[in-house]
Amino acid sequence: MSMSASPGWYPDPSNPGMEHWWDGNQYTHSQPRQHSTMPAPYVGMARPADVSPKSRTVASILGFFLGGLGVDRFYLGNIGMGVAKLLLGWATAGLWPLIDWIIIISGQAHDGDGYAVTRWE
């Protein structure tokens, strides 16, 4: 049984932060992962889900109570944005924390590796 897939970048199941190039016959080279929605052509292997292990519940609670300090961004692994939000969030008069909280609640947030934060716990 053979599986044909079109050439393209696919997630590396052994390293979620990487993806590799499928040339139609074999995987040739790798690079840091860019968010992709294409299915991986793995035969006999489970494809890793594009869902973050981070909890949307925890992120939304942190965003509601400590979003002005960037704690939600730190939790999700977006360290640079967390630092920026901590230092500059006050200048947005509360809009940045509110918008981030709405993004988390709506399921549109992504963690530091680009995975969607969708799990309610």
Image (spheres, rainbow, N blue to C red):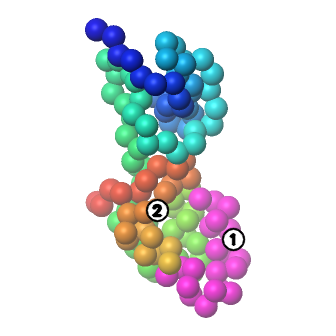
Labels 2, 1: front one: 2
Decide: few, some or many residues near mark 2? Use Cα within 10 Å; few <14, some 14-19, many ≥20. many
The vertical placement of 106 against 44, above or below, is below
On the image, numbered disc 2 is attached to which residue?
109
Mark 1 packing: few (<14 Cα in 10 Å), some, or many (20+)? few
Magenta stretch? 78-98
In this picture, is 75 found above or below 4? below
Q: Position of residue 8 (x, y in %)?
A: 53, 29
Q: Secondary structure at mark 2?
A: loop
Q: Quadrant of residue 41?
A: top left
Q: Residue at x 33, y 27 (%)?
A: 46
Q: CA distance from mark 2 to mark 1?
A: 17 Å
Which one is nearer the viewer's eye here, 42 or 105?
A: 42
The dot on residue 84 is 1
Mark 2 or 1, nearer chain start: 1
- Quadrant in which the N terminus is drawn: top left
User: Residue shown at 33%/56% (left/top)?
Assistant: 119
